[in-house]
Image (cartoon, coloured by chain):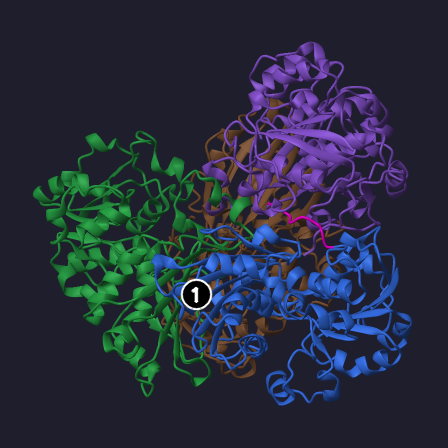
Chain colours: A brown, B green, C blue, D purple
Amino acid sequence: MIKVGVVGGTGYTGVELLRLVAQHPEMRLQVITSRKEAGLPVADLFPSLRGHVGLAFSDPSRAPLSDCDLVFFATPNGVAMEQVRELLEAGVRVIDLAADFRLKDIAEWERWYGMTHACPDLVDGAVYGLPEVNRDPIRSANLVANPGCYPTAVQLGFLPLVETGVIDMGSLIADAKSGVSGAGRKAEIPILMAESADNFKAYGVTGHRHLPEISQGLQHAAGHPVGLTFVPHLTPMIRGIHATLYGRLVRPNIDLQALFEARYANEPFVDVLPPGSHPETRSVRASNICRIAVHRPQGGNTVVVLSVIDNLVKGAAGQALHNANLMFDWPETLGLTQLPILP
Amino acid sequence: MIKVGVVGGTGYTGVELLRLVAQHPEMRLQVITSRKEAGLPVADLFPSLRGHVGLAFSDPSRAPLSDCDLVFFATPNGVAMEQVRELLEAGVRVIDLAADFRLKDIAEWERWYGMTHACPDLVDGAVYGLPEVNRDPIRSANLVANPGCYPTAVQLGFLPLVETGVIDMGSLIADAKSGVSGAGRKAEIPILMAESADNFKAYGVTGHRHLPEISQGLQHAAGHPVGLTFVPHLTPMIRGIHATLYGRLVRPNIDLQALFEARYANEPFVDVLPPGSHPETRSVRASNICRIAVHRPQGGNTVVVLSVIDNLVKGAAGQALHNANLMFDWPETLGLTQLPILP
Amino acid sequence: MIKVGVVGGTGYTGVELLRLVAQHPEMRLQVITSRKEAGLPVADLFPSLRGHVGLAFSDPSRAPLSDCDLVFFATPNGVAMEQVRELLEAGVRVIDLAADFRLKDIAEWERWYGMTHACPDLVDGAVYGLPEVNRDPIRSANLVANPGCYPTAVQLGFLPLVETGVIDMGSLIADAKSGVSGAGRKAEIPILMAESADNFKAYGVTGHRHLPEISQGLQHAAGHPVGLTFVPHLTPMIRGIHATLYGRLVRPNIDLQALFEARYANEPFVDVLPPGSHPETRSVRASNICRIAVHRPQGGNTVVVLSVIDNLVKGAAGQALHNANLMFDWPETLGLTQLPILP
Amino acid sequence: MIKVGVVGGTGYTGVELLRLVAQHPEMRLQVITSRKEAGLPVADLFPSLRGHVGLAFSDPSRAPLSDCDLVFFATPNGVAMEQVRELLEAGVRVIDLAADFRLKDIAEWERWYGMTHACPDLVDGAVYGLPEVNRDPIRSANLVANPGCYPTAVQLGFLPLVETGVIDMGSLIADAKSGVSGAGRKAEIPILMAESADNFKAYGVTGHRHLPEISQGLQHAAGHPVGLTFVPHLTPMIRGIHATLYGRLVRPNIDLQALFEARYANEPFVDVLPPGSHPETRSVRASNICRIAVHRPQGGNTVVVLSVIDNLVKGAAGQALHNANLMFDWPETLGLTQLPILP
């Protein structure tokens, strides 16, 4: 049983983390911070946690985070980088669910996130927490950069193709659709229900922060730079990401289904569907699974991959727990076996 | 570990039962039947169950139900009553999630359900499976009539008032709102998304089958007949029931909050909220909890009770498992501790 | 063709007003103000108006409102009362879509709205703009207080019963459900889509500002005070109000259907449905109609009235145009004949 | 004033057609047929039409369609082709909103639609009713094949690029998202609200009937065959199509914004948005407009076009009325000037 701290527990990633930590047999939630809600019992803000989370939010400045074995940051970008060094030096292991340690190229990070990085020297040692790629480094990591939601769905969908070089690396297209919880629990007009329900739109076509993260991951898998067009869309649902991925086959004789099945044969959280399938986002709702189908329409040279995750679980809090399971040498699926909620 | 059978597993109550049974540590799903889908792997119909339910649907006529220790009927009304006798005689215990054994008055049942009852002699021995009322009889029951979704939410909200006689029994009003999964997984136009999303309507104002069930329960609690107006509404959400209950106080000095808290102090699945609360349906989504708040607007003589449940869990499959836990003498919350999914 | 001004055009009431004014054959939109958005073309904020509204938002302090023949206030409560006197003195007629002039009892108003009324002397001369009650006074009014959304649906549903005294006036119950646009276009967390979709809750049970407004109207219709319990609910849809109204019959022999049909026989915007009907909110979506059904479940003494409107049209902007049609002696339905949008 | 008949008025295309025809100043609805609902007043099925459509459904076999000047078929595929010849011979002009006359290649049609074409000789004379392409032929047509919803959104988005040859014709990608009304008013489980709300999925990746229709149109515009990958998705909203289109630029110096603006400068129903825009489906809800934005992310060689329509209006009934306006030499926008409904 380890002692766990959560910094920034009032967003959707935070409350999802609390839900999962509360059900994890080896974790005891020790402290949860929120500048704005300090003093308020967590279950008053989130009645769904009544009876399961007895703590109140602590003021971040006085929270005993150094006593924890593991601290999750579920904060806005730019917060974790200010506090991580102190925790690491105190021997605390850290998983950052925000973007502070995801990009290895500091200049690129600073350009996309519009701020100066507070601890560039720690970035190199941080491990990108996509277990399907970095399982071993994660085990021994002290600082894990938990992947973004879109990057998780898109990379898992592209990886088998990119690692084997069966598609043209210069013309990848990721058309991704996210539920509104992906935009966070923020008081902003465009994500009001009266604005976003019964409505569909693209956004960030000119450039989205997950683009460099995805590119970095695919480039690493390919061994050389990739050309990627990434178009995210806001979808009138609460949870879920559906990535529709397009690539041009350069090795037309490949058995795509076999390729995907082999790549993920031993992955507990990636499920390759039978040929001809169309995964639904609800088939993974509230669970840590990524379901994938691969198509080759009309037998042509375009590969279409469909990849779905729950953005708050496999795209955030669940993947963070998966990383923790690796870091503490527990079974990978510990505390993550909840079945999807359908309907 | 007992052997469990599920008759009729293709509806929403059925798939929810499968989700919960698959996570119950003392149950092994042995057989699941469906006339229409016989031979089809369950996980092909419900991909959310991939990896957790390996069975295929069996043809009901050849399913080895008598080998089970417990059989759940998640069938349309009128099916269980044709098969229960044989199972009971074979020593199988039965929980019917449909309405066949809910009403003690056979004539009343036949009037509301429009058919002749196949085994009226078994009705008397059936126990109405609302644990908060019938805990002890359920323990020893061989045949449990699992309550309807509306009746669960409405009765739990009214019980403290009715049992103590603090309100006028002749003028109870239950204004109830249900998500569309309450209408079942049936190919019917009014529950298409294009019909029921972004729309709200009452239905069955002239008479709904849950009216006699609620009346029977409240009458039993009161010790004499009650006058109830019940108006159900279809709400554009998937899961959840919100019952808004109105009663006229006849003992105005009563401390309503204390009354409710005392009544449910030892109930693991009923949560009385602090004064002034407004429970949300999502605060119980996918969990077996009923949350209740009691109000007395402007200090007048009208009591307003707000009661929320997930219609598929506390209103169906979860309550059925709760009943099973009682019948097999397991801890009441076994397999039912999943936290609500929010957002 | 009159010159029309709109003060506060960035909320949902405002944009709906713009949609309707733009299609009204006798109105020319002259000026539209917004402190926050001054200078921004209206159609940049609301692309749905591209090609139909060419104006930009003006700064309120410099907007030539006195040149208008008619000014609509689609502002938060408390704004209109600061500006109306000057406009009236300049000969401009005014329709306030907020609550500043709805309650005749100034002390009551100040208590519910938490501010001192800026022009109590004007309240008496203001006409409550419910055409079905005040048709003639509206014709000659210079200042119209446009009713609230809930009050419109609830009063129209209760009026035939209350005016004729066929129900007990001491125990009226209005259980009302509103779509989220009723909460306005405000950056607030509880009305985010991730909070309010797939969710249902009551709110304001202890007291809602529309309670005194409804009570005042029903009391006026009854000729004496009424006892009303009003419980509003937030419903996961964009537009629409469904009021479910309960009353106890004191004249059991009354023909309720005939009563309702007679009351609204000549009303262009109230549609009494055939016996046994359940009006849906979508049957009036985007139109100025109120549809009503009256029931007497099981032939008992409880009357149940179902009343639906579009909160932004008959509950706000459409009713305001109806009032304007009366004030300027145009046909009542001018510019208001758009059919509901279904599905 | 012409006499109009509607064959098959019980689907969403049909009821939308009725809404628009009822508001068209030059059309009088003379007859509306439905085999299943013969005898039923239309407004009983669709209360939104109460007071505006007084007709009852007629049995198709006895409906006086030949007396009409114009007949719309809002029927399933394969119905119109059985009846059109007789009507044309009687001098009636026909607009088919289904697919019977959309594909010029009869063999191709028979392969995709799985039936033998009943009147292949009439196909050649039918005009594909996309006014932005076929304005003049439509004016004189007696038989118009109204385009499909996806084909309308996709073609309008690709046309400026394809007509000028600025993109590679061999690698077009159309990732399209539709609201559930596009699936029709049919009693089918996958489009139940409990199945399709809060859910997102692709479908028909292996082949969708709109693929050959789009290909035919683009090929015609390009002057030679095109290679198109088309992936439709079901989106949890009622109305709306969002097409996200990808092409590879072969003339990188082109000013894309100017190209699109010039192409649609005189089109009353196509609105090219300013650079950097992201059109929302709700910005065209219930109106006959297509809004388009063109992007070139990161200044690369991939063009991204975003194109939105209301599938029931510009994608069906509204475009049919536009065609009728052309055929009868009325102003193109007659009866089609309703503003979009937002929120």
Mark 1 surroundings: few (<14), some (14-19) or many (≥20) residues within 10 A? many
**Main secondary structure type of the part rendered in magenta:** loop
For image coordinates 84% across by 57% down, the residue present is C26
Left or right relative to C53: residue B333: left
Can see residue A310? yes
Up-down relation of residue B96 to residue C122 (above or below): above
For image coordinates 8% across by 43% down, the residue present is B89
* Residue C251, image x, y percentages: 40, 68
Report the span colored magenta. Answer: C336-343
Which residue in the rendered view is the most extreme toward the front? C253
The mark tally for this picture is 1
Left or right relative to B203: residue B140: left
* Residue A210, image x, y percentages: 66, 53
Closest to the observer, D180 or B266:
D180
Residue ID for mark 1: B283
* Residue C161, image x, y percentages: 49, 67
Q: Say which chain tag 1 marks.
A: B
Closest to the observer, A179 or C286:
C286
Left or right relative to B198: residue A200: right
Name the quadrant containing residue D8. Answer: top right
Name the quadrant containing residue D9. Answer: top right
Is C1 in the magenta? no
Name the kind of residue labelled 1 in the image: Ser
